[in-house]
Image (cartoon, rainbow, N blue to C red):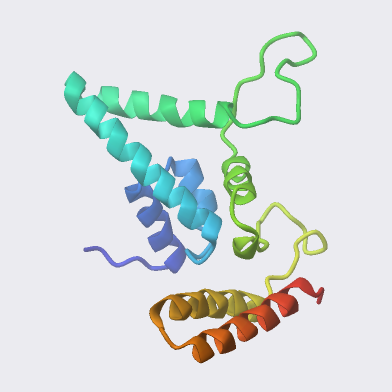
């Protein structure tokens, strides 16, 4: 296996192997793989690819046909996203649908549970607009998830009560600003 000179290049090719389009992989390679919305996107794309390969194999498509139809499916996925702008230009011609990976990311981000939502650094935002990712809060969310798993594994009611108290305290700390 080839060694990559940078981690970002390795992330780019990992996303390309998951059948992300080049523009999507280029944008998402800026992120580490710790963000829940990106994890969800990767799971969705993997499921889409598996269903697509079953369809392509059943119809006997060649490599070129597969690439064309796959790209068309991904562009159709972006076309389904809600848009805040008009679909026609000033000359009444339809506007070409461009792929903006962050639109898809935002749509997936909206559907995540509240405890998995935290700000994602983006190159298109200025430092003023971009909220800082609080590492302490991220760690607290992970601890809460670990405690919930521990509650399921233990049978001792005292330990369960203690874990629930810790979870309540950390959730209260997460809700407080700053």
Q: Is residue 158 above or below residue 131?
A: below
Q: Nearer the viewer, residue 134 or 26?
A: 134
Position in image of residue 37 (x %, y %): 54, 55
Q: Is residue 54 visible?
A: yes
Position in image of residue 9 (x %, y %): 42, 60
- Is 14 placed left or right of 89 in the picture? left
- Is 117 placed left or right of 58 in the picture? right
- Is 8 placed left or right of 169 in the picture? left
Q: Is residue 133 above or below residue 69?
A: below
Residue found 60% across the figure and 38% down from its top: 100
Position in image of residue 39 (x %, y %): 47, 57
Please, which residue is most extreme toward the top here? Answer: 92
Q: Nearer the viewer, residue 51 or 25?
A: 51
Residue found 57% across the figure and 41% down from its top: 104
Q: Nearer the viewer, residue 43 or 86?
A: 43
Report how many numbered discs are placed on residues in the image. Answer: 0
Q: Nearer the viewer, residue 129 or 40?
A: 40
Residue found 44% across the figure and 43% down from its top: 22
Quadrant position of the C terminus in the picture: bottom right
Q: Is residue 19 visible?
A: no
């Amino acid at each position: 296996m080839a060694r990559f000179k940078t981690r970002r290049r390795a992330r780019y090719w990992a996303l390309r192997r998951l059948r992300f389009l080049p523009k999507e992989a280029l944008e998402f390679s800026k992120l580490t793989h710790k963000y829940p919305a990106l994890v969800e996107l990767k799971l969705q794309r993997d499921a889409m690819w598996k269903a697509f390969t079953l369809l392509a194999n059943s119809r006997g498509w060649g490599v070129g046909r597969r690439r064309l139809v796959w790209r068309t499916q991904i562009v159709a996925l972006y076309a389904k996203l809600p848009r805040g702008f008009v679909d026609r230009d000033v000359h009444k011609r339809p506007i070409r649908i461009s792929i903006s990976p962050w639109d898809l990311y935002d749509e997936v981000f909206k559907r995540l549970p509240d405890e998995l939502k935290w700000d994602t650094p983006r190159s298109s935002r200025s430092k003023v607009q971009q909220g800082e990712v609080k590492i302490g809060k991220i760690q607290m969310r992970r601890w809460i998830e670990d405690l919930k798993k521990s509650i399921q594994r233990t049978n001792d009611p005292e330990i369960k009560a203690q874990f629930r108290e810790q979870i309540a305290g950390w959730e209260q700390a997460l809700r407080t600003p700053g």
